[in-house]
Image: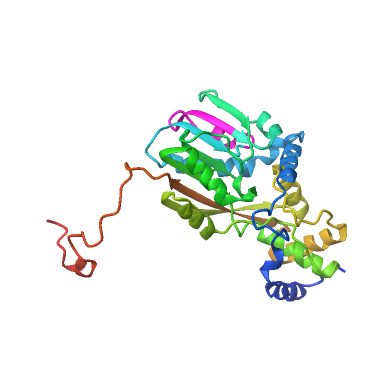
Amino acid sequence: MLLQSIARSRLLKAVFNRIPWAFMRSKSDSPMNVFNRQAKRLQKNRAALLPNADDYDYLKDEIARRIVDRLSDVSRHFPSVLDLGCGKGHIAKALTTTHVTSLVQCDQSEEMLKRSFINPDIPTKTLVVDEEFLPFDKNSFDAVLSSLSLHWVNDLPGVFQQVKTCLKDDGMFLMGLLGGETLFELRCSLQLAELEVEGGFGPHVSPFTEMTDIGNIASQTGFNLITVDYDEIIVTYPSIHELMDDLRGMGENNASWSRKNVLRRKTIEVASQIYKEMYGDDDGNIPATFQILFLIGWKPSDKQAKPAERGSGAFSLKDIDKIDFEK
């Protein structure tokens, strides 16, 4: 039956908070095989073929703009750039000749790639490429950019290593992907609804990378001058139905091997009620949180600034109050 009160919702939330998060992980035997890459390719192809496909580009366009904003903060021009997992060319929409000279766009979805935006001022080549297996030669690019693509790869450390290999010395890797707090409202509502209706739950929202993970992976891969930060974007929807429809339209529906293929109508009804009771506003709308993790890393080079040797400073921090900065 539908939950009748906020108190009941809070009780279920307390139960949810005691459920080990490990149960949400993939049941695959290999930790490097969380996602069904073929399913993701098909989902993206279907999304690209929708008659109103452009209506779902708002989030990806916004994140791509933020990627390019970070690129603009780097006072350098990058002659040859790879857009890894380009989708429909969201990064290319924001790029100018100030940033790059030439661009290579690649994506595993051939239908997305067919509809990719081509900047008329930037010579562009498009390639169907699985982001987990990069075909590029060593030292091919001055920069690799990636926006909302790499949260679907299984072997993220392996991809980082391949990116580092195809970068030139002192080349930059700049990416943004969905982080662990993404869609926590939807995840909580669906799992509470399944507990209410079916007596158990399965993963309906894919597992996402944590902020500390990408920094550690970049460091272990050998990138230098690593910067990690995040943004949270909250999008308001009339109900859970519009949210789930938009996720499908973006090609961002669940692609983990352990996902449940069927979501019962009754469960969706209960989840919709829980969502509104726990997170909805006074107008009946619901928020959806998208956490975007951004990483900048540089391939090592002799040109890069190096930290001073330990003990080489002219002053000790303990004597900072004694320093006359006006001299």
Q: Nearer the viewer, residue 82 or 75?
A: 82
The N terminus - image quarter: bottom right
Residue 326 in the image: x percent, y percent?
Answer: 14, 57
Residue 17 in the image: x percent, y percent?
Answer: 68, 73
Q: Nearer the viewer, residue 79 or 67?
A: 79
Residue 128 in the image: x percent, y percent?
Answer: 65, 32
Magenta-tinted stretch: 87-105
Identified at 63% across, 31% down, the residue is: 116
Identified at 22% across, 62% down, the residue is: 311
Image colouring: rainbow
Q: Is residue 282 something that shows in the picture?
A: no
Inspect the magenta stretch and tell me whether residue 244 lies in it: no
70 on left or right of 313: right
Q: Is residue 85 above or below residue 215?
A: above
Inspect the magenta stretch and tell me whether residue 98 lies in it: yes
* Image-quadrant location for residue 251: top right
Q: Is residue 277 above or below residue 18?
A: above
Identified at 74% across, 63% down, the residue is: 189
Identified at 69% across, 75% down, the residue is: 18
* Image-quadrant location for residue 268: bottom right
